[in-house]
Image (cartoon, rainbow, N blue to C red):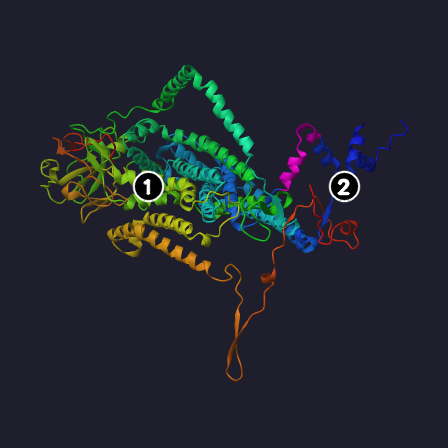
Amino acid sequence: MSAAPARTKRNAKAAQGPFGRVGNVVNELDDRLGVAKGGRVFLDKIFPDHWSFMLGEISLYSFVVIMVTGVFLSLYFVPSTNAVIYHGSYAPLRGQTMSEAYESTVRISLNVRGGLLVRQMHHWAADIFTGSIVVHMARIFFTGAFRKPRELNWTIGIIMLILAIFEGFIGYSLPDDLISGTGLRIGYSIAESIPVVGSYLTTFLWGGTFPGDIIIPRFYIIHVLIIPLILAGLIATHLGLLVRQKHTQFKGEGRTENNVVGSPMFPTFMAKTTGFLFMVAAASALLGAFAQINPIWQFGSYDPSKISYAVQPDWYMGWLDGALRIMPSWEFAGFGHTIPLEVFLPAVVFPGLIFNICFLWPALERRMTGDVALHNLLDRPRDRPKRTAAGASLFALLFTLFAASSTDVLANYFHVSLNVVLWFFRFATVIVPIIVAFVTYQLCVEMQGVHGIGKRKRALIVHRSSAGEYSTVTSDLRPDDERTELHPEPVPVRIDIEPLRAGSSAASESSPTGVRQVNR
Amino acid sequence: MSDSDHQASRTRVPMPIATLNDPHMGDAAKNPGRIEVLVALIFVVAIIALAGFGAAYWQNWSPWIIGGTMGAGLFLLGFGLTAWGKYLMPQGPFVEERHVLASSADERDSLAAALVERSAVVVKRRRVLGGLFALGSGIFGIVALFPLLRSLGPVPGNSFEVTDWRKGSLLVDSNGRPVHKDTMVPGGILTVYPKGQEANPSGQATDQTVLIRVQRTDFTTRPGRESWAPEGYVAYSKVCTHLGCPVGLYEQQLELLVCPCHQSMFNVRNGAQPQFGPAPRPLPQLPLAINSGGYLVAQGGYDQAVGPGFWERTTR
């Protein structure tokens, strides 16, 4: 047809509609999947701003780092206990017989380009992963975010913590070096201590008695496939529930039980959180580059009859090691059977008890307080003295046990007898949590009564007049003191992103505050 | 209707618009110049660092240069992006209503009714069918345990009770050299194995034995063990009775064996009775003899299971 418009860029652009190619893609997708409404709601999803809400993000992003570095390591690691003789570049080990697992880990560390960095990043990111889960959990606990309706996500979180601890232990056991081999031997003995099924459990898992030749390949598949798969599924569920139930938030201007106040998913939150992903990866890279962790080539390969002094597990196992150290030697023997209570109680029953208390806490609190309402607004820890005291007390117990895992080092360092250190920790394990609980409770109660708590203090200026008389004046407000919280508005449908121009048409369209109340 | 008509109709949708004038957009967004320059600078340095990372990897420089440049580059990229988000993007506070997740009472009842009434019809009245199905699944569950669990490894049997020490087993060190009665000076300590097990990992793990020579030649650790320590040679299992670590440290003056894992201490003089720490039982003692060639041999195996406790361990 002669009336067809000329094929100019301008006409092509006009034919695409006001939102160009993206608009076309939206149209095509929406015709088929109906994504427009839900997609816009998703982009407008509100994320409350509080620094403590990024703790879970650290866990998520360190998991990403672990996955990426782990794939790299799996390309070089050989999960086998077959004996080989080392002919590599590290002179002190040359000629020694060692397992392929150890040999390949030494090769990754010393010969694969970038291997040592990636191995150390993997180990550091795993420590960050477990650590950030613990801190995230503490935030959830002390602010009461686990309350109805979020009990299920609390439970999933604890399962992930337990899995992370197992995954970490199995991971640092894989290189088959002298220290990790000793750790495996201890793990084997702990499994062996379980009444009735212990010896079956160990021979099934190890394919015979310790050390056997199957445990490294088995741990490998658990480490690289089974637990990561479960973790990935649980992470997806955790985040899915979070989207469905929406975030909790602290009390503040315009914040109620029935809304969420913060910044929108796109672009603000997405930019900040992607930036944070990069920064967590950067932290792992910098630690991996500058802070040596687990230099296995210095330890030598595992030999069941060798051991080194002052061996300690990774930090998240320290509390169990401490519990094992301070436990009295109470073995039960009778009726033709033995129950090694000195192992079974601190290493199996005790962690079981701790994690079960964590699992049951939301139900316990519901029962104790009779509060069965839905909660979307968070507590300040001081407003719930009993809960805060209980949590602080648990942390005090775990920290004391963690410190008790270095009894020998402390005795050496302070030149006191090991016996004194041991008995100190036996008493401290009982007394410290009680003191901490009491002090925390009192502090919370006192803080509740302080006027203007949480606000910045204004300095008092003391003047001395020429007559020698003293007087005090409150200092001027500083800029931040006066800033009041804005009242939250719904996310505007469109934003004029150009910096303000005098007499701009968009500006004159809008209401005096700049935002139109939008009815969507 | 042609495609362009469809598109044209979209332009008529009126949508309210907000400007950067609004306080919810953030202060810096109105005058973005300085922040833009700053973020751009951060990104430029990040790009330089990441190029350095590439060069460091290419040249195989040391791990701290590879990691340092990568870490610096990633950090600056992340920092710049976060600053961009914090200063140049709509800040809020914006609000979103929270929808009630709970359904209406009618919907709840209808779900409960379906669960209760339909199951009453199709399950309760067909008890035999249900029972058979449950039985079938149960049998499968139990049978499936075998490939899942039992095939993983052997049943323990007496494998926790036995070692490779036999009557007449020659004591050898980790290189397979036998121990002559003149080899060790008093106060010496050596890890020994029954000949043939010194290089076998499972032998090393269970049979490892610590051989000590004390000053006294007529040395008896406990009544009934008068002949077990010829010429002052005494041998104990090296597997700690607490958690199975090698009891690798020897305090020569006090004649104490110390486990480095959890500091259990065993007194060499009285049959390795635990003197300190969490170990519940003495280390089993290996009865020794000296053969006609003057070499140390075992009079027999250990009289009990070595290592940590377990359920089937018989009480003595």
Mark 1, residue position? A350
Q: Nearer the viewer, mark 2 or mark 1?
A: 2
* Chain identifier of the residue bearing label 2 in the image: B
Residue B116 lies in magenta, yes or no? no
Examine the residues drawn in magenta and state their main secondary structure: helix
B137 over A401 or under it: above or below: above
Q: Chain of mark 1?
A: A
Q: Quadrant of the C terminus of chain A?
A: top right
Q: Is residue A5 left or right of residue B183?
A: right
Q: Pointer 1: residues within 10 angstroms few (<14), some, or many (20+)? A: some
Type of residue at label 2? Pro
Pointers 2 and 1 in contact (CB under 8 A)? no
Q: Is A207 placed left or right of A54 in the picture? A: left
Foreground: B31 or A306?
B31
B41 or B53, which is in the foreground? B41
**Residue furthest out toward the bottom:** A467
Q: Specify the quadrant of the image occupied by residue A23.
A: top right
Number of callouts in the render? Answer: 2
Give the residue number, with chain letter if any, for mark 2.
Answer: B14
Judging depth in this view, the residue of A402 and A483 nearest the camera is A483
Point out residue B240 in the picture as x, y percentages from the top left corner.
Answer: 25, 39
Q: Which residues are magenta?
A: A28-44
Q: Is residue B181 shown to the viewer in this render?
A: yes
Q: Quadrant of the N terminus of chain A?
A: top right
Residue A94 in the image: above or below residue B153: below
Residue B182 spot, x, y in % from top left: 15, 39
